[in-house]
Amino acid sequence: MDFQFSKRVPNLNNDVVGEILKVAGDPDIISFAGGLPAPELFPVKQMQKAANEVFEHDGQDALQYTASIGNPKLRSLVKNRMQTHKHISCDVNNVCITTGSEQSIDLIAKMMVNPGDVVLVEKPTYLCALDVFRSYGAKIIGVDMDDDGMKVDTLADTLEKYPEAKLIYTIPNFQNPTGRTMPANRREKVANLASQYDVIVMEDDPYGEIRYSGKAINPIKHFDPDGHVIYMSTFSKILAPGMRLGWIVADKKFVDMFVVMKQSADLHSDNLSQYIIARFMEENDLDAHIQKIRDVYYSRASMMIKEIDEQFPKGVKHSNPEGGMFIWVEVPGNINTMDLFNTCVEHNVAFVPGEPFYPDDVIPGTFRVNFSNMNDNQIHEGIRRMAVAIDEMMNK
Ligand SMILES: Cc1ncc(COP(=O)(O)O)c(C=O)c1O
């Protein structure tokens, strides 16, 4: 049967990333393609204990429907963390629990974007966010980056050209895919530009807590003069993505409308998971747990960078992330990274080519590698295989 799907439904024949991840899933392949946290760091035992206690003490409530805005205890714990760790001025009414940041992105886009509306994004950016904006018919405009993230002068010029822009989507910490971080002066400028042009900033911060070197930088939301910034984060990278919980911090008026939109999306996020994470946070030292993640990722990132520096051909450049899960690599000489991907697969190693991360004109020769989910041997051997493949392509 021929289904008459809406215009929102993407063309499956164009699912390049799905195809890449399918190939990269072959067990013989060392895959730097995915973006998975290290599963050995999931706090399984502590989570099991928290879950048992929830069933024992709050079983009936935890299995019941709950408020769309989220579990009051979890919202309060998140609010405290936002104040102490992120220096965001907020109260519990500014916090809504979501079904991960992916839902936050989707609902905010649904609330703000009519077909043809302009959305500004970093170039390159998180490809699933691009898919969301496309699904609502946004006109997506890429803003150039440098090693310090989105160029704010270019952002200002772009806003001058598109003063009607509805959204600025940015990932200021250890950006996906580049691993780059925006310094404080740029963050403050973004907040002020948003106010000046009356445009909403979606500050997507799934990786901010996974800083393993350098000094923490206050979020854009910290500088928000008047409610134009929506801060989003998630338990996916600091606890467990399978529990599918994240949150937004925003102006109360925005949160009130967000909650109405969330009702029609899923009524509320998984109540049982909310109870369990709240209990986990009360009983455990979340900072100590995050420190373990930082230590492991630091070691893996350092190892991968060392291997890239030692093994990749001369002229190859890479980002130097201070946290997060990704390194961005730039190969000289107009190399098509889809072709490089195919050559790498022949050598049993995989990554994600740069193309799908670009909203518009693709910069050739770029790709993303993930280090969080691979052990030292896999990193050493995988980078060795990639080096051989890159060498082959560069000398073709
Ligand atoms: C930049 C960015 N935003 C959002 C998400 C989605 O996270 P969540 O698991 O909270 O839905 C990811 C996941 O990798 C991401 O990299």
Image (cartoon, rainbow, N blue to C red):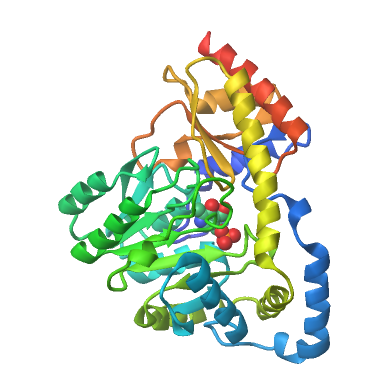
Rendered view: 67 above or below 351: below
Give the quarter of the image for residue 357: top left
Figure quadrant of the N terminus: bottom right
Q: Position of residue 125 (x, y in %)?
A: 43, 46
229 or 340: nearer the eye? 229
Rendered view: 171 above or below 248: above
Please indicate whether residue 226 sits to the left or right of residue 43 in the image.
left
Q: Residue at x 67, y 78 (%)?
A: 278
Q: Residue at x 52, y 28 (%)?
A: 338
Q: Most extreme residue toward the front, as rendered? A: 215
Q: Position of residue 26 (x, y in %)?
A: 74, 36
Q: Position of residue 225 (x, y in %)?
A: 28, 70
Please indicate whether residue 164 sits to the left or right of residue 43 in the image.
left
Rendered view: 396 above or below 361: above
Rendered view: 3 above or below 46: above
Residue 63 visible: no
279 or 351: nearer the eye? 279
Give the quarter of the image for residue 200: bottom left
Q: Residue at x 68, y 52 (%)?
A: 293
Count of number-bearing discs: 0
Residue 225 visible: yes
Q: Position of residue 170 (x, y in %)?
A: 39, 54
Q: Most extreme residue toward the top, as rendered? A: 395
Q: Residue at x 23, y 45 (%)?
A: 153
Q: Quadrant of ligand 1?
A: bottom right
307 or 51: nearer the eye? 307
